[in-house]
Amino acid sequence: MEMANCLRCRKLFPRINEPICDDCKKREEDLFLAVKEFLRENPKSTILKISEVTGASHKRITQWLREGRLELSSGSGDLQCRGCGKDITSGNYCDPCFIQVNQDIDSMFSNNKDAKIHGGLSAGAMRTRNTRQ
């Protein structure tokens, strides 16, 4: 089992997947629940107001919004589409830009579907590494 220092508190812990220890994960989840409860009671709040009241950083709240774990009421102006800059309530893209990004990704893969690499697999194929000696 790999040991690592927690990115938040620097405590040494047995790292499985997360880069933070169980104590910091618990504190973060408690903070998330406090933000979620505050938004439930105050749905038209801005990120600044949420941060002031709950103590959650602007960066952390924005991260939760981008991950889709939280959603702002429409028209707050706190979160913009990464494609066109239009106001959004959650995630990274507005609906039209999301569709366009997905179409762009699909076309990239369809253009490469004929490209071949080792063993006849397509360029986007996933496989396990041969570790036998």
Image (cartoon, rainbow, N blue to C red):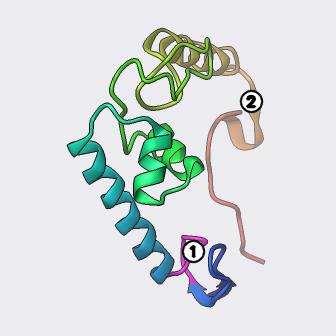
Name the residue tied to disc 1: 20
Work out whether residue 31 can be spotted. yes
Q: Position of residue 88 (x, y in %)?
A: 45, 21
Looking at the rendered structure, the kind of residue marked 1 is Ile
Q: Position of residue 24 (x, y in %)?
A: 50, 77
Q: Position of residue 118 (x, y in %)?
A: 76, 42
Residue 1 in the figure: left or right of residue 72? right
Secondary structure beneath dot 1 equals loop
Residue 39 in the figure: left or right of residue 76? left
Q: Which residues are magenta?
A: 15-21
Work out whether residue 67 can be spotted. no
Looking at the rendered structure, the kind of residue marked 2 is Lys
Pointers 2 and 1 in contact (C-beta within 8 Å): no
Residue 11 in the figure: left or right of residue 91? right
Name the residue tied to disc 2: 116
- Observer-nearest of 44 and 70: 44
Q: Quarter holding the C terminus? A: bottom right
Residue 16 in the figure: left or right of residue 117? left
Count residues near mark 2 (Cα–Cα under 10 Å), then give few for <14, some for 14-19, many for 20+.
few
